[in-house]
Amino acid sequence: MPLYDDVVSNDQMLEEAIVHLADQFGPQPFYQVLQRLDLVPLYSSIQKQMAQRIVLLEEAVAHYRNSDAYQALAAASQTAYGYELNMFIKYCVNKKGKNPNINDVSSATFLTDYLAPVKKANTRSKKSAFLRSFFGEVLEHFYGRNIEKLKRTLIIEADKDREPRAFTKTQINELLSLVRLGREAHRNFTILWTFLGTGVRLSELCTLQVGDIKVDRQVIMVRGKGKKGYKQPNKITTSSLKTLSSYISFRYKGLEAEVDYEDRYVFSDDKGATHLHESTVQKMFTALINEATTIPENDKKPYQFSIHSLRHSFALYLLESGVNIYTIKELMRHAWLSSTEVYLKLYDDMLVTAIEKHPLAQITITELF
């Protein structure tokens, strides 16, 4: 009898827990998770109803644009994915007519044909990354389906021939000199020096708030890539920390007692209420590059040097100074060591260039014999 009571009690507790989870997250999402974990049969009445539903491309696009999968992207990624989305819509309309069924444009065959004209591995990978995001969100939401099979078609490959571009120290010195002579010199110098002393990304710098500066720990708290809302500690050099702290003191002196003091954005045009737009920083930096005489004209073309090159410079100078690759990985906040190892080849190329400047390197073998 006691054994029977225990079984009944456990069943009741399990039922109550399941009902609680279903109420908390909704019956359909709860079922979808169970199905993904292979804890329930693939096709139930709910699954059949979802499979029979007709979802048009227009509805799928509207959902994706408002989904967390898209909204959580950095501003630059949203722009890139928005462009890719418009390109894909045009292709779908051209091949399937206006507003086709989402099922008609999500097959492996259709997507293979869409990607076929793209020859460059890097461009193809970018398109595949977008399509994974789009169909991953849409098919999960409307049909409870994952895209594991589609991933075999939507392959993402790193472009092994593409190397990060970093500035030379001479070029950095000129950029630092030029920024002092321009408009908003104090702010823009602080921005540039913070980039060089932290290796942070553009979006991370723009969203920096006063409370994110932790002087005692020598770190700044940044919203890492793909982790919107979640802040990570990022080390900062002493000189950059002093420059940044000095700028904050200059700009917000006397407001320390305000309740929103720590929430104010460091770089802002409206007293810290909203952060400086990424495009503002990009335009400022592009103007510096165009003005610099130590940067060759070919390197001033689009997609050569950019703000992200400052992050590459940060990593390369660490490597040049003898810091090991594992420490650099942590300072760069890379998830994978392979992301950091790309700098090894760039550094090796620098050494080859340097040794070729040796006086004896210019002597040919025929001159010796």
Image (tube, rainbow, N blue to C red):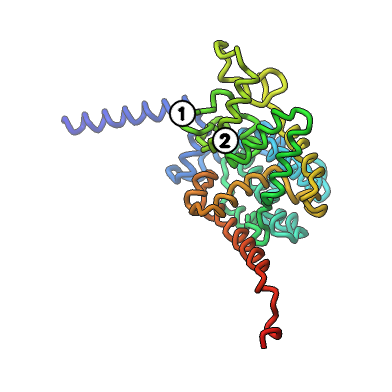
**Residues packed near mark 1 inside 10 Å, few (<14), some (14 to 19) or many (20 plus):** few
Closer-to-camera residue (338/313)? 313
The reply, left or right, for residue 102 in relation to residue 291 is left
Q: Quadrant of residue 247?
A: top right
Q: Earlier in the sequence, mark 2 or mark 1?
A: 1
Relative height, residue 140 to residue 266 (above, below): below
- Determine the residue positioned at 54% across, 52% down: 321
The reply, left or right, for residue 309 in relation to residue 320 is right
Total marks shown come to: 2
Closer-to-camera residue (277/214)? 214
Residue 304 in the image: state x and y as whole percent: 75, 51
Instruction: Look at label 2 and name its amino acid.
Output: Ser
Instruction: Look at label 1 and name its amino acid.
Output: Asp
Residue furthest to the bottom in view is 369
Quarter the N terminus occupies: top left
Report the residue marked by disc 2.
239
Residue 279 in the image: state x and y as whole percent: 75, 34
Relative height, residue 194 to residue 352 (above, below): above
Residue 176 in the image: state x and y as whole percent: 70, 39
